[in-house]
Amino acid sequence: MDEAAGLARGLTEPEAPARDRPDRTSDTRERIVALALKVFAERGFDGAKTREIAHRADVNLGLIKYYFDTKEGLWKAAVDRAFEELRQGLQDVLGDSGQIVGRDGLEQAIRGYVRFVADHPEFGRLMQDESKRDGTRMRWLVEQHVRPLYDEIRNGIEPLQERGLLPPMPAASFHYFLVGAAGAPFIQRPEFQRLTGLDPTSKDFVEAHADALVRLLLGPESA
């Protein structure tokens, strides 16, 4: 049975328990989105099945159609949720403005990002999977979420570089050094543990990794 048929059948299945009825629940949608993010990260968009997501979220399959209309609608909701959590995590370290101001702000943003991807490796896996394909989802992802963060980083580093407070480096290189290096130990956790014998999710390693990335990207304070 294909995905469309599965969704249609889900709409005709027996009524969901009261906890799963769309007009009587406050957390069902969020539960579906959270599980969807994990499944999309594990299997990629094409490999992910809405029936599996519904099963893992313990909800009626028809609720996916009700809340998200299509599989792509669910994928977008999962990505939106991931970036909302990222922005909230950065705001927690940057303050109410959420803006990267000065070298200290940039350092806190780097540390906040490392901590986020350590806690949410599924975020990095999903981003890796989608970024290697030139398709409509990748383009939506860039314009909706990645470009605004890239522009904020660029606007944060270029004035500091002009004042000699950061090493000269293209904003694009800074962005991809940050994204690639920050998440690698957590996204590739099995390989990392096999190679090093370390647990990348331990607080000591996460903080040491953040320290190393700050030194790598920002250089000494007298740069």
Image (cartoon, helix red, strand yellow):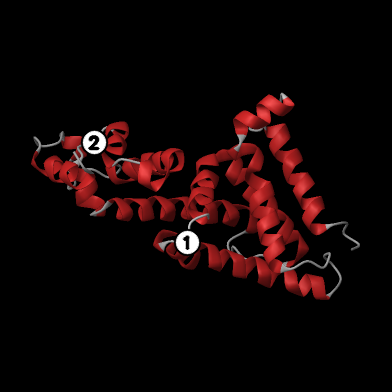
Q: Is residue 199 left or right of residue 88?
A: right
Count neighbours of disc 2 (C-alpha within 10 A) and say few if under 14, some if 14 to 19, many if 20 or more. Answer: many
Give the residue displayed 50% in from the left and 64% down from the top: 142
Give the residue displayed 71% in from the left and 28% down from the top: 195
Total residue callouts = 2
Q: Is residue 83 left or right of residue 50?
A: right
Count neighbours of disc 1 (C-alpha within 10 A) and say few if under 14, some if 14 to 19, many if 20 or more. Answer: few
| Residue closest to the eye, 138 or 119 | 138
Q: Is residue 186 left or right of residue 19?
A: right
Q: Secondary structure at mark 2?
A: loop
Residue picked out by circle 2? 59
- In the figure, residue 121 lies in which quadrant? top right
Q: Amino acid at mark 1?
A: Asp
Residue picked out by circle 1? 134
Q: Is residue 84 above or below residue 140?
A: above
Give the residue displayed 50% in from the left and 48% down from the top: 129
Q: Is residue 190 above or below residue 63?
A: above
Tag nearer the camera, 2 or 1: 1
| Residue closest to the eye, 135 or 67 | 135
Across and down, in percent, residue 157 comes to 73, 68
